[in-house]
Amino acid sequence: LSAFKRSCKLPLPINLGISERRSEKQRAFALLDALSCSGSLPIQFCEIHAIVGLAHCFENSLIDTVIMQNTSPIDELSRSTLRVASAIFGVSSDEIVEKKGGES
């Protein structure tokens, strides 16, 4: 087994239950409370940006994927990104593709 394949282990899925979500929400509000000094510092015109990191591991090397399997790595990455967007926005992949197609 190559070093690349050993380093590309699939992450374990984490599903938060109701109590864990409630706890994480409380932690987020506690952080906001600390950053605003318990509301004494006004937070005006703010934006919240969430960054989602994504790593895609191919079963084979890029060359093997393209030449030997005749598979486009771009298509695999697009499907992965679509799955992540579906999870973030809470809609099906079909709805995302449909909406994008309707905007063109």
Image: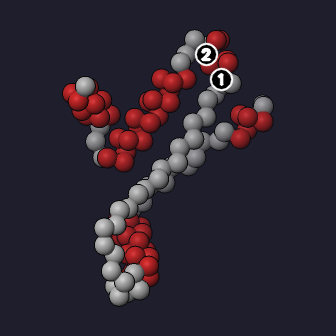
Q: Is residue 87 above or below residue 98?
A: below
Residue 59, visible in the rendered structure: yes
81 on left or right of 60: left
Question: Badges 2 and 1: C-beta atoms under 8 Å apart?
Answer: yes
Establish if 45 lies above or below 53: below
Taking depth in this image into account, of 3 and 17 the one nearest to the observer is 3
Residue at image x 31%, y 72%? 44
Q: Quadrant of the N terminus?
A: top right
Residue of label 2: 66
Q: Read off the residue under disc 1.
A: 62
Left or right for 51, reference 60: left
Relative image position of residue 79 (x, y in whole percent): 44, 30
The residue sitting at 78% across, 31% down in the picture is 2
Q: Is residue 25 above or below residue 76?
A: below
Q: Residue at x 41, y 86 (%)?
A: 37
Q: Going by the image, does 44 lie left or right of 63?
A: left
Density class for disc 2 (Cα within 10 Å; few <14, some 14-19, many ≥20) is few
The extreme right residue here reads: 2
Q: Quadrant of the C terminus?
A: top left
Residue 56 placement (x, y as % from top left) = 57, 36
Residue 47, given in percent of the width and then of the height, sits at 35, 62
Tag shown at residue 97: none
Residue at screen point 62% across, 19% down: 65
